[in-house]
Amino acid sequence: MTPAITIRIGRLDFIGLDAGEAQRAARHFEMALQSLLERDGLPAGIAAADLESMDLGRLSLRAGTPEVMGRQLAQRLLERLTP
């Protein structure tokens, strides 16, 4: 059984989106991140304890719909974690 992972995101800013679009992007980010972690787990070499406190800074995204932006952000976050 895979151990549970809880991730708390302090802040997500989707610059250029209105409040409704930002909520859609955030919802799709959460769903995509959950799906990626369920499918692949954490990147090799990363333990849950390594994620206790970290600042990923800015992650730039290609233009797209809020849904696409949310999915891209989840993928970029996991790419940043890969050693």
Image (spheres, helix red, strand yellow):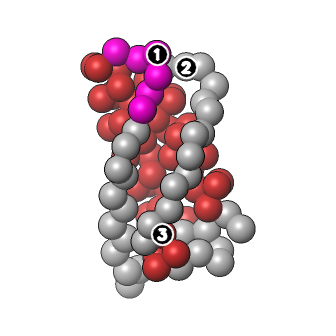
> In the drawing, what numbered circle is on residue 64?
2
Quarter assignment of residue 52: bottom left
Q: Residue at x 42, y 32 (%)?
A: 13
Q: Amino acid at mark 1?
A: Gly
Disc 2 on helix, strand or loop? loop
**x%, y% of residue 8?**
33, 58
Q: What is the crowding at mark 1: few (fewer than 14 residues within 10 Å), some, or many (at least 20)?
A: few
Give the Cα distance between marks 1 and 3.
28 Å
Q: Residue at x 64, y 55 (%)?
A: 80
Residue 56 part of the magenta segment: no
In primary-sequence order, the first of circles 2 and 3 is: 3
Q: Quadrant of the C terminus?
A: bottom right
Quarter assignment of residue 25: top left
Q: How many marks can you see?
A: 3
In primary-sequence order, the first of circles 2 and 1 is: 1
For the residue pair 12 and 35, the one nearer the viewer reads as 12
**x%, y% of residue 70?**
46, 35
Q: Which residue is mark 3?
A: 51
Give the Cα distance between marks 2 and 3.
28 Å
Residue 17 part of the magenta segment: yes
Disc 3 on helix, strand or loop? helix
Q: Residue at x 63, y 25 (%)?
A: 62
Magenta range: 13-18
Give the Cα distance between marks 2 and 1.
11 Å
Q: Is residue 60 above or below residue 48?
A: above
